[in-house]
Amino acid sequence: MNKLHKNKKNIPIHDLPQKPTQDFDFKLYHLKGEYARNKNLSSMPGETNVPHRHNFYEVCFFTKGGGHHEIDFRKFDIREFSIHFISPGQIHHLAGTEENQGYVLAFSTTFLLGENEENAAWLAKLPFFNPLQGPQTLKLDESDYFDLLNLIEHIKGDETRMGKSARGIIRYYIKIVLGKCHYFFSLDKESGKLVEDPTLKLVGKFKHLVEMHFADLHQVQEYSEKLAITPGHLNRCCKQITGKNASDVILQRIVLEAKRLLLFTGKTSKEIAYSLHFEDPSYFSRIFKKKTGYSPTTFRNSMREKYHQ
């Protein structure tokens, strides 16, 4: 059963619906649009054109179409042969055109990982599922795109033929799709070769740590100690790769979480500050305004007005 939790203050949270014959959290849908409607194809339930979030991962494959896709307050164009990635908890909405065609691959963390802890570490390091790693979209040439789409078609076919028995097979298909996407993300756009830069890897590890600990660790030194390097070295590496120092990367993730909480919940600015381990709520408000140009209250009101909440 599909559940949609909402009230006057919360952005909707979509759960994965379940069929009576299916006991695992995985779904494959067609993108909403004229093509899916005319062909009577199943598409993502709920209003995808208004801000919402999920408790599962989504990978959107755009074969045709246009418009834009907003993920965590960043707007990305919808282009043919592109793939967009959404992590659990991220706010997003699709403002696509009626010409949109493609698939939405949805799966829960539990389904993909099973009982394997190594899988959890692998999933956490995929750059397109980390909001700190940059754009969560991938534009491919036609050949590479349809190579991945062929795997999606296999998922669809095996689910239809094999039902519950497809559980393990589909899990491996999804891991192959994500692994190939990771490969394409790692290519240097000019040379077409894999990037093997130790500084890039170090910054990737740092961003992974920030994603895990941003709520309780706010100091650069706390992260540099975990990485067994000096704060100065971490700052230099971050500046080289991202153009920002390490403290800015940490604050970027804290502010993103604050934005989500301002929209997700009815918590006051003070309550959000305490939940993010700021002892002084006024200091938190000053940081938020410095990074966004808005006070927390003004940001909340402007976003709710924008999205007609």
Image: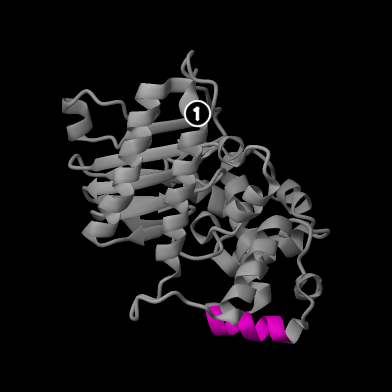
- So how many labels did they put on this image? 1
Q: Position of residue 24 (x, y in %)?
A: 54, 26
Judge by depth and name the residue closer to the eye, 165 or 58: 165
Q: Position of residue 105 (x, y in %)?
A: 41, 39
Identify the residue shown where x is 74% and y is 56%.
Answer: 215
Q: Position of residue 260 (x, y in %)?
A: 58, 48
Judge by depth and name the residue closer to the eye, 198 or 297: 198
Q: Would you identify the image quadrant in which residue 33 lies?
A: top left
Asked whether, in this view, residue 9 is left or right of residue 106, the answer is right
Q: Would you identify the image quadrant in which residue 279 lies?
A: bottom right
Q: Position of residue 194 (x, y in %)?
A: 44, 74
The residue tagged 1 is 16
**Mark 1, other Cα within 10 Å: few <14 / some 14–19 / many ≥20:** many
The image shows residue 168, relative to residue 280, as above or below, that is above
Identify the residue shown where x is 61% and y is 41%.
Answer: 113
Asked whether, in this view, residue 279 is left or right of residue 155, the answer is right
Identify the residue shown where x is 33% and y is 50%.
Answer: 148
Camera sees residue 17: no
Identify the residue shown where x is 79% and y is 77%.
Answer: 228
Judge by depth and name the residue closer to the eye, 80 or 28: 28
Asked whether, in this view, residue 27 is left or right of residue 263, the answer is left
The image shows residue 23, relative to residue 189, as above or below, that is above
Q: Magenta span has 88? A: no
Q: Which amino acid, by three-letter code, is at mark 1?
A: Leu
Chain part drawn in magenta: 233-241
Q: Would you identify the image quadrant in which residue 251 lies?
A: bottom right
